[in-house]
Amino acid sequence: LGDAQGNGPVPPWQATQILMDRKLMPGVPVKIRYTLPVENVRKIRAVLMYRFAPLPLLKKLNITDPAFTKPRIMVTKSLVLK
């Protein structure tokens, strides 16, 4: 969320625009490409994590309670490459 000048993140009550929307919607596939930093990778592990709000916003609001700052693991998947 951003304010009228494009600054963000800002609290919802100060927001006039959405600067970035990275929501994952049910049933909508999302492809993300990564370049692997090394050769001969044999196994990949992906972890989908959720936060209540972006860390910079929590920091601005002085929210330090781990119930809000700690990421929640939603799904973990591993893939063995051939």
Image (cartoon, helix red, strand yellow):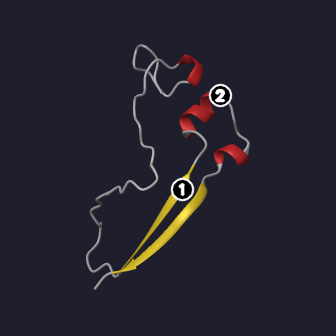
- SS state under label 2: loop
Residue 63 sits in quarter: top right
Rendered location of residue 23, percent (x, y): 45, 44
Tell me if residue 11 can be seen: no
Image coordinates for residue 55, horizontal then vertical, percent: 56, 40
Mark 1 highlights which residue?
Answer: 49
Query: What residue is disc 2 on?
Result: 61
Q: Quadrant of residue 45?
A: bottom left
Q: Residue at x 44, y 75 (%)?
A: 78
Count of all numbered marks drawn on residues in the image = 2
Q: Nearer the viewer, residue 53 or 37?
A: 53
Which of the 4 image quadrants contains residue 80? bottom left
- The three-letter amino acid code for the residue at tag 2 is Leu
Q: Residue at left 41%, top 37%?
A: 21
Q: Residue furthest bottom?
A: 82
* Image location (x, y in percent) of residue 49: 54, 56
Q: Inspect this view and state whether residue 10 appears.
A: yes
- Determine the residue located farthest toward the top in the rendered image: 4
Q: Alpha-carbon neighbours of circle 2 within 10 Å: few (<14), some, or many (≥20)?
A: few
What kind of residue is marked 1? Met
At x 58%, y 60%, the residue is 73
